[in-house]
């Protein structure tokens, strides 16, 4: 079978690169006789600084017009759109009777539109374009969601039929593993962490949904309690509000930003940390939970959205909006080494269940089902109609914080 993997533009999204790389590697392992090809928009930002606005024009022209047009010349049995943000491609593929599958990772921009608008340079235009793009998933032959929670969001916000959605979880790379104790101590010395210091770690963006301010509030409370605490953040730097909190609570010596890191450094940081603290208020999955567990690091994460699906009983689940509860959870790990060691064992077992070979096998079966269904003499290829109500109508009534998070405002 010939499979065309439609990726995001290079360096657009770290998590989408992780997903695409893992899936492609897994597919080549479980279906070695298949031809797996990769495609992405040819977006380059090479204009002088004073003409960067023109780069944006070229980006949209390439992504929404030239790139889809190029796909009409590609021969494949099934096209797989890696990210829901490119769901508009389903419309183009459907017009030329191309079978296509889309992976939907999360629909946070519909669940929390105010956060999205607050991060966009041109909020209303960006939101309208994004809605139009993801609504294209209604034209896919099958939608894959990475969690049951995201499946319910796809049904709720996009009106996609449950029978057209298959839940297939993400996985964790085999490179994430516990390092030898002497190597861990060497890493901790490099980051000037004493034996007594209890190190918290978080990697990702500084978007409000990542709840970094809550982590900082926990660090401030533990500092008051004279716990030798230190918080390392990798990924995107602290935003202005977070930096202001660090300054006003005198946390400079208790907090470090280590920048964007490669996989080798990330594995070292997971191993050096005593705990991954990931109290995000919304996730469609949660790669970092599995990466930490596979590295032998205990996890404290939120009890909302998709995090409990990923964590199972191998992590401490907390109300992400309750600073006191999170503080108690961290302090419990600090004062009870036995509890920490128990979580290490559970985490290693839990993470071992999420392999890219398993994910790829399930995705390959979806390709085969879609392909065989299209070839069936009883099946005629026809355009899917979008749900009767428009996406805009379905999004007018926004769910409350209780509905989204399962917690109080």
Image: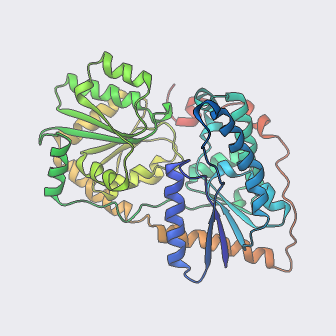
Q: Residue furthest front?
A: 48
Residue at figure coordinates x 73%, y 39% from the top left: 129
364 w.r.t. 43: above or below: below
From the viewer's perspective, tell me whether residue 74 is left or right of residue 242.
Answer: right
Seen from the viewer's position, the closer of residues 375 and 252 is 252
| Residue at position x 47%, y 67% in the image | 356
Residue 123 location (% of width, % of height): 67, 28
Q: Nearer the viewer, residue 144 or 13?
A: 13
Coloring scheme used: rainbow
Q: Position of residue 135 (x, y in %)?
A: 75, 47
Query: Which residue is at 56% across, 53% downward?
Result: 10
Give the residue at the far top of this rendering: 248
Whether residue 392 sits left or right of residue 42 in the image: it is: right
Residue 23 at x, y percent in the picture: 53, 65
* Image position of 94 with respect to 112: above or below: below
Residue 158 relative to residue 268: left or right: right
- Quarter occupied by residue 249: top left
Quadrant where the N terminus is found in the figure: bottom right
Viewer can see residue 314: no
């Amino acid at each position: 079978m010939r499979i065309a993997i439609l990726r995001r533009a290079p360096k657009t999204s770290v998590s989408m690169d992780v997903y695409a790389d893992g899936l492609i590697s897994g597919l080549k392992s479980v279906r070695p006789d298949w031809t797996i090809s990769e495609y992405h928009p040819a977006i380059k930002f090479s204009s002088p600084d004073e003409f960067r606005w023109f780069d944006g024009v070229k980006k949209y022209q390439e992504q929404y017009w030239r790139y889809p047009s190029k796909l009409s010349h590609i021969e494949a049995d099934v096209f797989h759109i890696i990210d829901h943000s490119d769901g508009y491609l389903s419309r183009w593929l459907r017009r030329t009777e191309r079978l296509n599958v889309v992976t939907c990772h999360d629909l946070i921009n519909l669940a929390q539109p105010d956060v999205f608008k607050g991060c966009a340079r041109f909020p209303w235009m960006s939101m309208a374009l994004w809605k139009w793009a993801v609504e294209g998933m209604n034209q896919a032959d099958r939608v894959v969601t990475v969690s049951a929670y995201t499946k319910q969001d796809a049904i709720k916000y996009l009106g996609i039929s449950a029978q057209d959605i298959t839940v297939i979880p993400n996985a964790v790379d085999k490179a994430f593993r516990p390092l030898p104790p002497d190597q861990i101590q060497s890493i901790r010395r490099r980051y000037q962490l004493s034996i007594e210091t209890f190190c918290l770690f978080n990697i990702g963006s500084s978007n409000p949904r990542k709840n970094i301010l809550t982590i900082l509030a926990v660090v401030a409370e533990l500092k008051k309690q004279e716990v030798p605490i230190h918080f390392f953040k990798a990924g995107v730097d602290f935003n202005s509000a977070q930096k202001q909190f660090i300054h006003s609570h005198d946390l400079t010596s208790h907090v470090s930003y280590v920048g964007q890191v490669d996989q080798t450094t990330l594995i070292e940081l997971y191993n050096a940390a005593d705990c991954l603290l990931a109290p995000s208020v919304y996730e469609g999955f949660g790669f970092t939970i599995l990466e930490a567990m596979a590295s032998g690091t205990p996890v404290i994460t939120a009890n909302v959205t998709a995090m409990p699906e990923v964590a199972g009983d191998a992590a401490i689940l907390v109300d992400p909006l309750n600073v006191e509860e999170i503080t108690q959870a961290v302090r419990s790990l600090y004062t009870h080494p036995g509890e920490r060691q128990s979580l290490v064992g559970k985490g290693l077992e839990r993470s071992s269940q999420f392999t890219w070979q398993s994910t790829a096998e399930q995705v390959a079966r979806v390709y085969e089902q879609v392909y065989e269904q299209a070839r069936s003499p009883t099946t005629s290829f026809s355009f899917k109609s979008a749900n009767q109500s428009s996406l805009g109508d379905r999004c007018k009534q926004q769910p409350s914080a209780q509905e989204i998070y399962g917690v109080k405002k």
